[in-house]
Image (tube, helix red, strand yellow):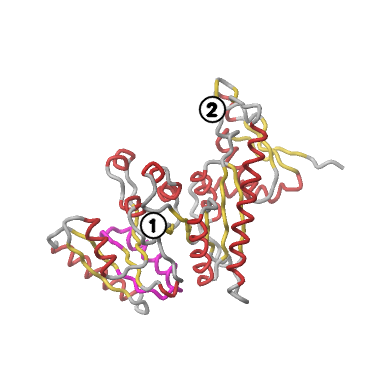
Amino acid sequence: MEEKIITLAVLSYERAHILKSLLESEDMECFLENANLIQGAVSAGVKVKISQSNLEKAMGVLESMMQDDLGVADRQPEKIPPRVLLPVDFSDYSKKAAVFAMDWAHQLGAEITVLHAYFNPVISAVPFSDTFAYDMNMDDMVMELEQKAKEGMNDIISFMEEKNDTYGDKKIEINQVLVKGVAEDEIVRYSNTYKPLIIIMGTRGIDRKSADLIGSVTAEVMEKVKQPMMAIPEDFEYQGLDMMKNLLYATDFQEADFKAIDALERIVRPLGVKIICAHIGGAKRSEWDDVRMTGLGEYLRKKYDETDVVCDLVEHEDFYVGLESYLQTHKVDVLSFTRRKRSLLSRLVNPNVAKKMLFHSTTPLLVFND
């Protein structure tokens, strides 16, 4: 008896492809009808079709996507264990990030999901009028890209399973997800559904071409994700979590800092690191900086009396020079701060701290988004 195919939802072109990616990440086959109609009124009539046997499971995915669209508070049930999301591109720096992520997941008692998004020329085809500019060899190209993605995923999973064996009886759960699409967009979409405690990614070193750095997927994801994100520089020499002693949270005395520090406490508590809360100001210390730092210190000591927390004010006329000097002098192993929302114009004219430090430091970055 043939499997009955039903229509799960009728959506816009963009939302239909998002739902398709989410369903495929849950191992549910689906296809789109009218997907070539991407302009005009008919663009809202793309049908997402699935097997009837997958209806109940698919409805859960659809409901979750709709809740994210409506801005429903993303709260994980307490019974669900913490999750670590590890986006990879199968490079050497992805493997370095994988080792770091596995050690951290092991300390947190978390599961880890390895995500890879591979380019899909069908979705990315340039529209002309109401049809795609379709290459006759595109089917073969899609199959080849998918096969390479599967081979790369098998390779990194094998690499991680070898590492997992070193944990003995306390192995971590390793999941894998392959999706089609633009990497930064798919990572953000999946993280909104998966809701990890932290996202960990590798990034290129400072010796790469500037064009590569500007186009870094890590930097783009850092701009968009809601969850805390850790970026591991390619040139970072990882020697184990037990060798990481000091974490610096750079504060500018904003309300968002308190929320970030609360999240920071949950994430790094199992690592036993010292938290340094520092403000990098101008060459001359402000009287208000002293008052605000004293207040922040009292808050931290009252709330986290079992944690080794240090508060400090750094005076330097150049923010980046002062920060780098402080990192070196105090042997900081992880730099953390909150990235503020800014307009497109300000991002183009004045790149934010996160992006600058991402490409000009060998220190891992733990970034929160305001």
Q: Is residue 275 magenta?
A: yes
Q: Secondary structure at mark 2?
A: loop
Locate the N terminus by quadrant.
top right
Which quadrant would residue 267 be assigned to in this image?
A: bottom left
Residue 282, x across and y down, in percent: 16, 58
Question: Which tag is nearer the camera, tag 1 or tag 2?
Answer: 2
The amino acid type found where label 2 is placed reads: Val
Please tell me whether mark 1 sits on a helix, a strand or a loop.
strand
Q: Is residue 214 above or below residue 316?
A: above
Disc 1 versus disc 2: distance between alpha carbons? 35 Å
- Farthest residue toward the front? 207
- As for residue 83 lying within the magenta part, the answer is no
Of 66 and 328, nearer the camera is 328
Task: Tell me if 310 is positioned left or right of 190 in this view.
Answer: left
Q: Quadrant of residue 276?
A: bottom left
Q: Which residue is mark 1?
A: 368
Q: Position of residue 269 (x, y in %)?
A: 43, 73
What residue is pinned by disc 2? 126
Numbered range of the magenta stretch: 250-276
**Residue 310, horizontal then vertical, whole percent:** 28, 73
Q: The residue under label 1 is which amino acid type?
A: Phe
**Classed neighbour count for the residue bearing mark 2: other residues with Cα under 10 Å, few (<14), some (14–19), many (≥20):** few
